[in-house]
Amino acid sequence: MEKGWVKIATYSNELTAELAKLALEQNGVMAVLLNKQDSSLKFGRIELFVQENDQIKAAEIMETNDTNGLNEN
């Protein structure tokens, strides 16, 4: 991931990861998912990144929306 981005959550379910990303974007926080899952077997993790200066706001949004992931930051 490029400089200036921080991982704030890790997911095992693609739908849950997308919902977390959507919640952030609806609240004005740019977010990126990095899918490290095997494409055919669907095992592995999906990581959610935000820009470093949005990290605190993103954590608050995720807490409010109960989209915290696996706590494997």
Image: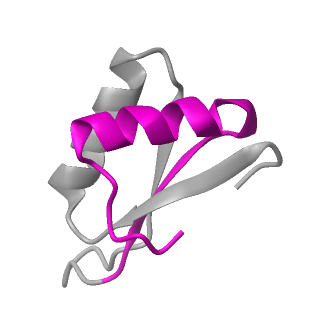
Q: Residue furthest right?
A: 3
Front-lying residue, 56 or 52: 56
Residue 29 location, x and y as percent?
Answer: 51, 24
Residue 9 location, x and y as percent?
Answer: 45, 59
Figure colour scheme:
one colour
Q: Who's the residue at 47% across and 75% down the image?
A: 72
Magenta segment includes 47: yes
Front-lying residue, 4 or 8: 8
Image quarter hosting the N terminus: bottom right
Magenta segment includes 64: yes
Q: What residue span does the magenta drawing correspond to?
A: 44-73
Q: Quadrant of residue 40?
A: bottom left
Above or below, comparing residue 15 to residue 25 in the picture: below
Residue 65 location, x and y as percent?
Answer: 24, 36
Above or below, comparing residue 22 to residue 55 in the picture: above
Above or below, comparing residue 34 to residue 31 in the picture: below
Image quarter hosting the C terminus: bottom right
Image side of residue 28 versus residue 54, left or right: left
Image side of residue 57 versus residue 65, left or right: right
Q: Who's the residue at 64% across and 30% down the image?
A: 54
Image side of residue 55 versus residue 12, left or right: right
Residue 43 location, x and y as percent?
Answer: 26, 84
